[in-house]
Amino acid sequence: MTIVVRPAHTSELAEIGELTVEAYADFMVADDGYAHHLRDAVTRAREAELYVALLDDSVAGTVTFCPQGSPWSELAQPGEGEFRMLAVRRAARGRGVAEALVSLCLERSRELGYHAVVLSTLPEMAGAHRLYERMGFRRVIVPAASGAPLERADGLSHPMQVQEVEDIRQALSAVLGAEP
Ligand SMILES: CC(C)(COP(=O)(O)OP(=O)(O)OC[C@H]1O[C@@H](n2cnc3c(N)ncnc32)[C@H](O)[C@@H]1OP(=O)(O)O)[C@@H](O)C(=O)NCCC(=O)NCCS
């Protein structure tokens, strides 16, 4: 079993869009419009960094890494990386595909000199939370500056939990400090 993570190729974008919609199906509210954003791998590839994970040469998962300034970034403050739309095909789950994708986002953040990585998630995404916690993410509830619930970039308003990364921040600093 080999997992390879790399930037998505143009020929894979339609498949990645469908994979993302399918992976999020359990969490979707009917007709809330979010599926459109999940499917839109073409725009994510243009406006952020879209990665694909291949499991034994087949497309198995994806993540969207948002560098500073990307319109897909929802939460990142200056000096923070962010990732969104982590999705793994059901048949490929439980083999470390998501872990490889999250590791790539941490690595990209370190390369770009960021001191933290943030992401938003929903309370019911328990499988993802175990992974994040294992990888050092810590949960914080972040009120929007106004005190209003956080608003997603697509304009949908949900009370959201935010995983912020005090520990990762320190870990990244330590790794960066250790490099020549
Ligand atoms: C959450 C999600 C991305 C996880 O993907 P995944 O590829 O199955 O994740 P991993 O394989 O890295 O880790 C999942 C489990 O498999 C285990 N695992 C990893 N590699 C393994 C291996 N080689 N053999 C056996 N088990 C393994 C991990 O320990 C982990 O166990 P846990 O459930 O106790 O935490 C996937 O379930 C998904 O797409 N969910 C829907 C969308 C979603 O919730 N996205 C997150 C939004 S914030």
Image: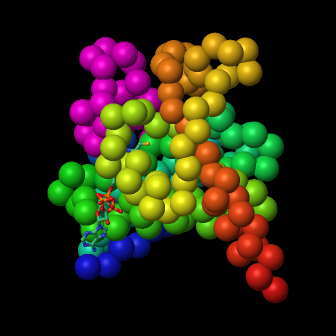
Estimate the x, y position of residue 57 in percent, counting from the top left: 29, 72
Q: Quadrant of residue 97?
A: bottom left
Q: Residue at 45%, 61% (x, y): give it.
A: 134
Q: Residue at 72%, 49% (x, y): give it.
A: 80
Estimate the x, y position of residue 110 in percent, counting from the top left: 70, 65
Which quarter shows the C terminus?
bottom right
Q: Residue at 48%, 19% (x, y): give it.
A: 158
Overall secondary structure of the magenta stretch?
Answer: helix
Residue 112 magenta: no
Query: Magenta region: which residues?
Result: 21-45
Q: Is residue 76 left or right of residue 24?
A: right
Q: Is residue 62 left or right of residue 149?
A: left
Quick check: 158 above or below 119?
A: above
Q: Residue at 80%, 43% (x, y): give it.
A: 78
Asked whether residue 141 appears in the rendered view, the answer is yes
Which quarter shows the N terminus?
bottom left
